[in-house]
Image (cartoon, grey):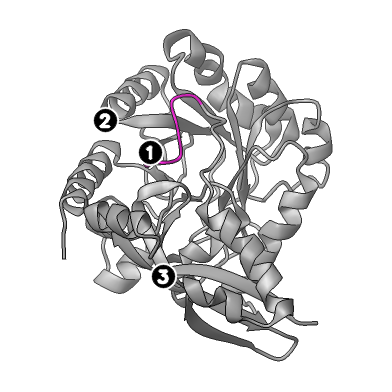
Amino acid sequence: MTKYYTRACNFYYGTNAKFLIKKKIALPLCGNQNIAFDKLEIITRNNKKALSKIININQVKNLNTSIKKKVREDLKKIVIKRKNFLKNINFIEPSIMGILNLTPDSFSDGGKFNKRKKAQNHIFKMIKGGAKIIDVGGESTRPGSKTVPVKAEWKRIENTIKNFKKKHKKINLSVDTRKSEIMIRAIKYKADIINDVSGFSYEGQSLSKLKKYNIVKVLHHMQGTPNTMQKSPKYKNVLLDIYDFFEKGIKEIKNKKIIIDPGIGFGKNLKHNLTLISKISLFHSLGLPILIGTSRKRFISQISGDNDSEERIGGTIASVLFLLSQGVQIFRVHDVNEVKQSILVFEKILSNFKN
């Protein structure tokens, strides 16, 4: 079986982008007039290998009929603006998801915020720094971590979840959990997003239990489990395998309020992570917002040297700014203020850039 994939590439920004869009030389990325592209990478995959070629957007009409239909369908999804389904987020301006780990053992900040007052103070700090989403988790999913029982996980996050909307009505509450019982409890306290690192596969029935709730779901990719995922992960083609995973998962989710996350560091080695980051624009052809979490991840120290997780802000910012240039809409980070500042400066420079 032969399958085709379409990736937008060769981007322009700011004044250049708007000029080229107006002249119909380039197209807007995800409805954003500040990012334009004029080339496509067409990837052809069969059982043996994947081949690719780069074409100009005006060459689509010259493709073979079998390829042309698929590329045109993909192109519509790449260009169209993403639907707004979260408070105060339009998917044109980049949004920050601040991380709140209420755990004793998360890889970077375990034990720092699992006291009630510290958790509340950190929420306020992240919102002040520019976070539009707060992602609350009570179970560590770092490499090698063990499963936490439902009762213990809920106990860690219960107070924060119950009181969040009383204080932060305009901020989106995301709950990071693999367990449907916790998902449903959180929804009853007006959670806006369910962020399941297992891609709703942990229990096998989470999606059916969530059918009656009109909740936004993060479709996250992970190979294996947190306990096993970094033990020699393997793919035929990491980029296309994860694309296929998303394509299948999207069909299984009925309400289509979906954000996709390729799961940097979740069952991926350094080469896998770098491939996903460098080719992230492929996933725009799925027509959904993209969320990325590179914050303080191990791949940064694998590149830069043996830095402690809290000393990886530079690598975090570098990856965020590259991903921003590729049209990624949401960034899940620990250091909200620093990342927000870098985004504002980077966007200001790009908006004034002219060739």
Give above or below for 76 relative to 2.
Answer: above
Q: Which mark is residue 278?
A: 3
Q: Which three-letter amino acid code belongs to the residue tagged 3? A: Ser
Q: Which mark is residue 21?
A: none
Which residue is pictured at 46% across the width and 13% down the height? 169
The N terminus appears in which quarter of the rendering?
Answer: bottom right
For the residues bearing labels 1 and 2, Cβ distance under 8 angstroms: yes
Give the residue pinned by disc 1. Answer: 96
Give the residue pinned by disc 2. Answer: 129
Range of magenta residues: 87-96
For the residues bearing labels 2 and 3, Cβ distance under 8 angstroms: no
Q: Which three-letter amino acid code belongs to the residue tagged 2? A: Gly
Image coords of residue 145 (percent x, y): 56, 52
As measured in the structure, the alpha-carbon distance from the residue carrying label 2 to the one carrying label 3 is 27 Å
Image coords of residue 284 (percent x, y): 53, 57
Q: Quadrant of residue 90?
A: top left
Give above or below for 337 relative to 122.
Answer: below
Q: Earlier in the sequence, mark 3 or mark 1?
A: 1
Q: Is residue 1 left or right of residue 120?
A: right
Q: Is residue 335 left or right of residue 263?
A: left
Image coords of residue 225 (percent x, y): 65, 58
Secondary structure state at the residue bearing disc 2:
helix
Magenta segment: does it hold 181?
no
Secondary structure state at the residue bearing disc 3:
helix
Query: Looking at the image, which is closer to me, 174 or 104?
Result: 174
Secondary structure state at the residue bearing disc 1:
strand
